[in-house]
């Protein structure tokens, strides 16, 4: 899988603290580390725009592309020549 996204820094103090708490709750193994000083650490958010999923169950190099917008997610089926493997490719 690959992902293309627009990223931005979370700057609101309450959102920064919430993001850090959610991360620590999701990954309890982080408990072995001290929490980062939010005045010295950037917290980023990513908004996915394009997700490419490679599925070898469908054949070598088969990829599906998901395009994400605010309103919808659309999927484009892989083309047979995605990896230059089309029988008609020269």
Image (tube, rainbow, N blue to C red):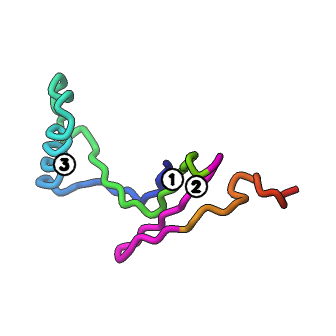
Q: Which mark is residue 19?
A: 3
- Reading the image, the residue beneath label 1 is 53
Q: Position of residue 63 (x, y in %)?
A: 58, 55
19 vs 65: above or below? above
Residue for point 61% across, 61% down: 78
- Mark 1 Cα-neighbour bin, 10 Å: few <14, some 14–19, many ≥20: some
Q: CA distance from mark 3 to mark 2?
A: 32 Å
Q: Quadrant of the C terminus?
A: bottom right
Question: For this rendering, which residue is in front, 48 or 43?
Answer: 48
Q: Secondary structure at mark 2?
A: strand
Q: Quadrant location of residue 14?
A: bottom left
Q: Quadrant location of residue 87?
A: bottom right
Question: For this rendering, which residue is in front, 73 or 22?
Answer: 73
Q: CA distance from mark 1 to mark 3?
A: 27 Å
Mark 1 or 3, nearer chain start: 3
Q: Is residue 9 left or right of residue 59?
A: left
Q: CA distance from mark 2 to mark 1?
A: 5 Å
Region rendered in magenta: 59-75
Q: Is residue 90 magenta?
A: no
Q: Quadrant location of residue 37?
A: top left
16 vs 49: above or below? above
The reply to whether dot 3 and dot 2 touch (C-beta < 8 Å) is no
Residue for point 40% across, 60% down: 48
Q: Nearer the viewer, mark 3 or mark 2?
A: 2
- Reading the image, the residue beneath label 2 is 63
64 vs 18: above or below? below
The reply to whether dot 2 and dot 1 touch (C-beta < 8 Å) is yes
Residue for point 14% across, 39% down: 25
Mark 2 or 1, nearer chain start: 1
Mark 3 or 2, nearer chain start: 3
């Amino acid at each position: 899988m690959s992902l293309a996204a627009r990223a931005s820094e979370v700057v609101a103090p309450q959102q920064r603290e919430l993001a850090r708490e959610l991360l620590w709750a999701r990954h309890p193994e982080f408990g072995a580390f001290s929490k980062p000083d939010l005045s010295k650490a950037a917290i980023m958010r990513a908004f996915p725009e394009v997700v490419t999923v490679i599925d070898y169950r469908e054949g070598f190099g088969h990829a599906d592309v998901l395009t994400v917008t605010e309103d919808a997610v659309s999927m484009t089926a892989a083309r047979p020549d995605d990896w230059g493997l089309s029988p008609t490719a020269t």
